[in-house]
Image (tube, rainbow, N blue to C red):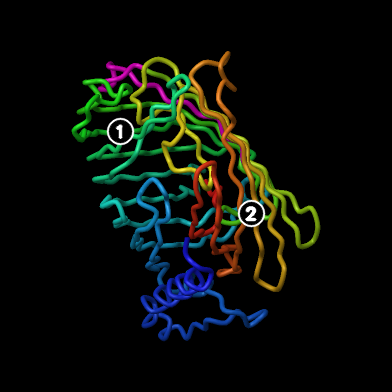
Amino acid sequence: MKSKKSISKIILLSIWIIVSFNGLNAQKYKISLRDSLDHAVDLSDYLIYAHGFIVVPTIITEPALGGIGGAVVPVFLKKHAPVIDENGKKRFINPDITGGMGMYTGNKSWMVGAFRSSTLIKPRILYRVAAGYGDVNLSFYENNLPNLPDQEFKLNFRSTIFYTQWLKQFRNAKWSAGPQYLFLNSKINLPDFNLPPPFVKPSDVKSTVSQFGAAIQFDGRDNIFTPDKGIRIQSDFFWSDNAIGSDYDAWRVNLSAIGYYPLAKTLIGGLRVEGEQAFGSPPFYLRPGINLRGIPAARYQGKTSIVTEAELRWDVYKRWSVMGFGGLASAFNDWDKAFAKPVVYSYGTGFRYLVARKFKLRMGVDVARGPEDWAYYIVFGSNWMR
């Protein structure tokens, strides 16, 4: 685990690179790095006036990808003013976010891609589109062996992915619903095992996943980056079938709830509850898993996963905050054996800095401990950003 001094240097270097890439445009508009209210270091005007373009260097700290890596994420941001609907009520519009990504990590995984999240203002439609290609090395585990430790299998994925979601806002703009679609084509390279992974079927080695679905969402958060109050609830499902070009017949249902509440003037509490259920025969790499800080991706999987996590943010001094968090989760195949194995836990701490006041965007570092090891995360916005 890196020292606090090293992590602080990474954050300062990241901010410096962001500013450097926008320096010429900033000089044109005479943009200051100091906020007009408290004169602290702030990037709001760069995000708004530098033609909405920034280059974000991101440190990748996911344990499942080798624990260290980097990504360059060029992002175009466009801020929208609130609009007045025909009913006379003010409707806030999320910023448009358009960007790309190039990633390389310590276990020789790499990925390139592009994404866009935006709003069609007049028809009141929120949409997301993402596509990419990657050569990714991930560890999967056989964790249903009675009285035996979990067995690790390192697999290589060469995958093409496309995802889109279109949500129509209701008269109450906090509510929205609509369709979504996922396409995933993968080729899996299996190392030479004495015995092949028991969860990998021959049809998994080269496969196509095509999934249609729908989602309904309530979003009452005060901002999408680092909320201080409000809740977001979403329920969605995906259907995969040979009739729509998929190699798998399966269903997947998700329910998530994320809420924030100011417990005191400088103390923000957060709670996250998520559950996922798979039906039929999904591929092993799309089985429900546990997503908690301190736990590698795909470490614990099953046909069902349940995750709960709580966090506190204490705004200690001006723009600086201290974080504390902890979570419990379980992944299992049968409800009657839901707690046959110990519940997985994680906990940790971290800090945030309000790097862009006008967006309520905070940046910082979390250090987390799971059942097996420590991990650290460079955080832009929130770990629960959706």
Q: Is residue 222 above or below residue 233?
A: below
Whether residue 87 is visible, yes or no, is no
Label annotation for residue 183:
1
Towards the viewer: 16 or 223:
16
Towards the viewer: 253 or 286:
286
Position in image of residue 309 (x %, y %): 63, 41
Whether residue 70 is visible, yes or no, is yes
Q: Is residue 242 magenta?
A: yes
Q: For label 1, count other residues whose C-alpha is less than 10 Å away and answer few (under 14), some (14-19) or many (20+).
A: some
Residue 342 appears in which quarter of the rendering?
A: top right
Q: For label 2, count other residues whose C-alpha is less than 10 Å away and answer few (under 14), some (14-19) or many (20+).
A: many
Position in image of residue 259 (x %, y %): 67, 44
Label annotation for residue 227:
2
Towards the viewer: 4 or 110:
4
Q: Which residues are magenta?
A: 232-249
Q: Is residue 107 above or below residue 16?
A: above
Position in image of residue 181 (x %, y %): 37, 32
In screen coordinates, is 15 left or right of 212?
right
Position in image of residue 375 (x %, y %): 49, 53
In screen coordinates, is 315 left or right of 223?
right
What element does badge 2 sit on?
A: loop
